[in-house]
Image (spheres, grey):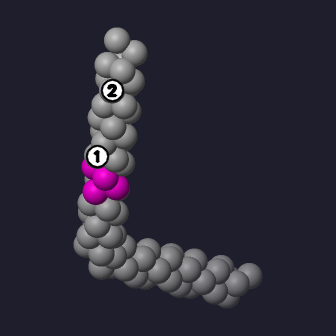
């Protein structure tokens, strides 16, 4: 009877060990795929971000130029 209990315990430990290995492997694969997806998203978004930054800079320059012109006009009136 004791022998069967030991065998059952060993078998259960092996099954548990294999299950843990499989779970770790699956988790690692999911993490790798998520990393790949994140890289692809970042790469796809990069040009759009650059365009947005350029547009923001241009708008800022326009506002600054318009403000400078208004200040010059106001200074001339004084």
* 71 shown above or below 18: below
| Residue at figure coordinates x 50%, y 77% from the top left | 60
Q: Are marks 1 and 2 in contact (CB under 8 Å)?
A: no
Q: Quadrant of residue 47?
A: bottom left
| Residue at figure coordinates x 28%, y 57% from the top left | 29
Q: Bounds of the magenta span?
A: 25-29
User: Is residue 51 highlighted in magenta?
Assistant: no
User: Is residue 27 highlighted in magenta?
Assistant: yes
Dot 1 corresponds to which residue? Answer: 22
The picture places residue 54, in percent across and down from the top left corner, at: 40, 81
Secondary structure, mark 1, is helix
Residue extending farthest right: 78
Q: Quadrant of residue 35?
A: bottom left
Q: How many marks?
A: 2
* Circle number at residue 7: 2
In front: mark 1 or mark 2? 2
Residue extending farthest top: 1
The picture places residue 51, in percent across and down from the top left corner, at: 33, 79
Residue 34 in view, yes or no: no
Task: Assess disc 2: are there few (<14), some (14-19) or many (≥20) residues with their C-alpha within 10 Å of its C-alpha.
Answer: few
Q: Quadrant of the N terminus?
A: top left
Q: Is residue 16 left or right of residue 66?
A: left
CA–CA distance in space, label 1 to label 2: 22 Å
Q: Is residue 65 left or right of residue 17?
A: right
């Amino acid at each position: 009877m004791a022998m069967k209990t030991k065998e059952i315990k060993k078998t259960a430990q092996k099954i548990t060990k294999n299950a843990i290995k499989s779970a770790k492997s699956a988790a690692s694969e999911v993490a790798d795929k998520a990393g790949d997806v994140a890289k692809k998203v970042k790469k796809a978004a990069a040009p759009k971000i650059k365009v947005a930054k350029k547009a923001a800079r241009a708008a800022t320059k326009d506002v600054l130029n318009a403000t400078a012109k208004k200040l010059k006009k106001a200074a001339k009136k004084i």
